[in-house]
Amino acid sequence: MNLDKFMLRAINESKRFKFTAKPNPVVGAILVKDKEIISEGYHEFFGKNHAEINAIIKAKKLIGKKFNTFDELTLICTLEPCCHHGKTGPCTDAIVESGIKNVVIGALDPNPKVSGKGIKILKENNINILHGVLEKEVEKSNEFFFFKHKTKKPYITVKIARSLNDVSYYANGFPAKITSKESRNDVQTLRANYDAILTGGNTIKNDNPRMNTRVDFATNQSKKILLSSKKFDKEKYKFFYDSDIDIHLNKNLKDIISCYTKSEINSILIEAGPKLTNSFLESGLVDSLIIYSSSSNINGETVKWKISKNTISNLGFKLESRSDIGSDIKEIYKNE
Ligand SMILES: NC(=O)c1ccc[n+]([C@@H]2O[C@H](COP(=O)([O-])OP(=O)(O)OC[C@H]3O[C@@H](n4cnc5c(N)ncnc54)[C@H](OP(=O)(O)O)[C@@H]3O)[C@@H](O)[C@H]2O)c1
């Protein structure tokens, strides 16, 4: 049986649910008899059935038509089946109960609640296991999830928008549209890719942003994280219109970020002004930096970023890509 072919299909199809499964990882499962796919299941929605369960439910409807008993089938799943009671029951129980006898796994689940334990339970129930099939591709499909469990911290990206003359905002706090419509739309898609969006109190006070994700595809909204000691009228400020918000009064960035090590949050996008952005960049907590630079100046009383090419490289960031976007330039730097 060409296991790579089925595993690759499970990986690729699972990615369709990246935005509705988040902050959970994307997972795919395929049940195969000989060389034929009997059923496929994906983790489509956060909090709902895992991929293996969906594949088993679909296959049950085909008993007596395409196969007679589950021991005729091989289960191919991208991630080690879970063995804990989360929002749904353990997948290992469903697999054992179904009578499946052969399981092929892409990558071990890096989550310590599961890692290796899912496989152990399956083996104890006399199920044959093969794991490590296209492991790297599975890890790549869940980059932030694997990063968080390996490094014990969420993946952190800082995004900034600046004018040609390096302006961040008007000194009087008057909201400034710095970049083009294309860049602003790109930021919406960027937000969809992160489990949380983080900002500071002055940005809320001056810009009154909603900071949710407005895209033309289905996505779970990201958690919002606010670092501020200010008291806000929650009726007046749009940021508070959504419910999933964490507020930190503390100013120690390492402590704040460490709050998320054991949470479901695998990635954080920082969209803040120069004070908070610079504190983050200097903290060593940032993994990538995205700069949208416009092609025109902003004049008047302004506050500048003061993030030069030298500062960026002294902080350990290397340019990974540079592209045109509308009338702006988008640069992505990675911390190595
Ligand atoms: N061009 C852009 O890409 C962009 C993006 C976002 C915002 N902005 C602009 O930025 C302006 C606000 O700038 P800002 O520099 O004051 O940024 P900010 O985004 O409001 O962040 C600064 C605030 O973060 C809080 N904070 C908590 N821990 C901190 C730490 N360790 N270091 C620094 N701050 C910490 C403090 O809130 P408290 O003082 O409330 O305790 C502090 O005043 C707004 O007018 C907005 O328009 C520009």
Image: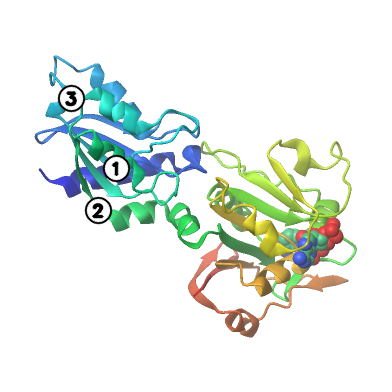
Q: Which mark is residue 70?
A: 3
Residue at the spot 42% in from the left edge and 28% down from the top edge: 89
Q: Is residue 240 visible?
A: yes
Please, what secondary structure does the residue beneath circle 2 have?
loop
Q: Is residue 270 visible?
A: no
The reply, left or right, for residue 82 in relation to residue 287 is: left
Residue 250 on image: x %, y %: 79, 58
Marks 1 and 3 close (CB-CB < 8 Å): no
Residue at the spot 39% in from the left edge and 33% down from the top edge: 50
Q: Nearer the viewer, mark 1 or mark 3?
A: 1
The reply, left or right, for residue 235 in relation to residue 326 is: right
Q: Quadrant of residue 281?
A: bottom right
Q: Which amino acid does the dot numbered 3 rest on?
A: Phe
The reply, left or right, for residue 69 in relation to residue 98 is: left
Q: Residue furthest front?
A: 124
In the image, residue 225 sits, relative to residue 17, either above or below, namely: below
Label 2 vs 3, first from the N-terminus: 3
Callout 2 crowding tier (Cα within 10 Å): few <14, some 14–19, many ≥20: some
Q: Quadrant of residue 308?
A: bottom right
Residue at numbered disc 2: 132
Q: Which amino acid does the dot numbered 2 rest on?
A: Gly
Residue at numbered disc 1: 120
